[in-house]
Image (cartoon, rainbow, N blue to C red):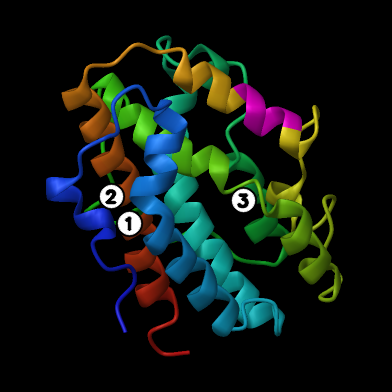
Amino acid sequence: MSVPAPCAQRAAFVPAPGEPLSATLKAATRSTHERLDQRLMALGIFDDRRDYLRFLQVQAQFHGAVAPLYLRHDLSLAAAEPCRHAKVLADLADLGAHAAVPMADAPSLAAAPLSVALGWWYVAEGSSMGAAVLLQHAARLGLHVGFGARHLAPAAAGVAAHWRSVRAAMDAIVLTDAHRAQAAAAACAAFEFVGRRVDEAFRNA
């Protein structure tokens, strides 16, 4: 089964008037996000270190793709935060592995329109919300924030407080309805990108 299916019929998705951007992106991606989360857990990514390494390869591809967002001047909060890509690479190295070659369909986000950057940033930062739970699962494999699960470390401000800051920064950016729809499409594209990496990483599992 390929994951995810097109989310919220993104070609026809119309943001609700006056709705905060973060709420628009959540609505647009909800079903795809849930399916992806369910599939990852069904794959048993914390059953053993071999499957966890496959999960790390997915993380390396995604966080490598979004790394340019954290250097953009028009995403000031992102620029103030450390990108998790380096931590994923350190986790791979802890387990004697290295990242695969970036895929040809990786986006070019360094100079992408702001609306596109916001969609991918929403997914990148939102992925940290479940880190505390994932860290508990990783502990069963002898992994922690100092070895093998560095990228799952919570934000210094705390997970909930950090996510509120991200949403507030995102919602403060004024976008046209067309640009909000572009951001929603970009967030969908980000989840679909992750879904393709999951398909590849676990194809022969």
State which region is magenta: 161-165
The question of residue 79 being in magenta is answered with no
Residue 174 lies left or right of residue 111; in this view the side is right
Rate crowding at label 3 as few (under 14), some (14 to 19) or many (20 or more) other CA atoms within 10 Å: many
Task: Point out residue 71 in the picture as x, y percentages from the top left corner.
Answer: 46, 19
Q: Earlier in the sequence, mark 3 or mark 1?
A: 3
Label 1 sits on residue: 193
Rounded to the nearest angstrom, the CA distance separating label 3 from label 1 is 17 Å
The furthest residue to the front: 17
Rate crowding at label 1 as few (under 14), some (14 to 19) or many (20 or more) other CA atoms within 10 Å: many
Which amino acid, mark 2? Answer: Ala
Point 47% across, 21% down: residue: 170
The furthest residue to the left: 11
SS class, disc 1 = helix
Q: Nearer the viewer, mark 3 or mark 1?
A: 1
Q: Nearer the viewer, residue 100 or 21?
A: 21
Q: Earlier in the sequence, mark 3 or mark 2?
A: 3
Q: Nearer the viewer, residue 27 or 90?
A: 27
Label 3 sits on residue: 88
Q: How many numbered badges does the structure rendering display? A: 3
Residue 154 lies left or right of residue 101; in this view the side is right
Which amino acid, mark 1? Answer: Phe
Point 27% across, 28% down: residue: 180
The label on residue 189 is: 2
Task: Say above or below: 36 vs 127.
Answer: below
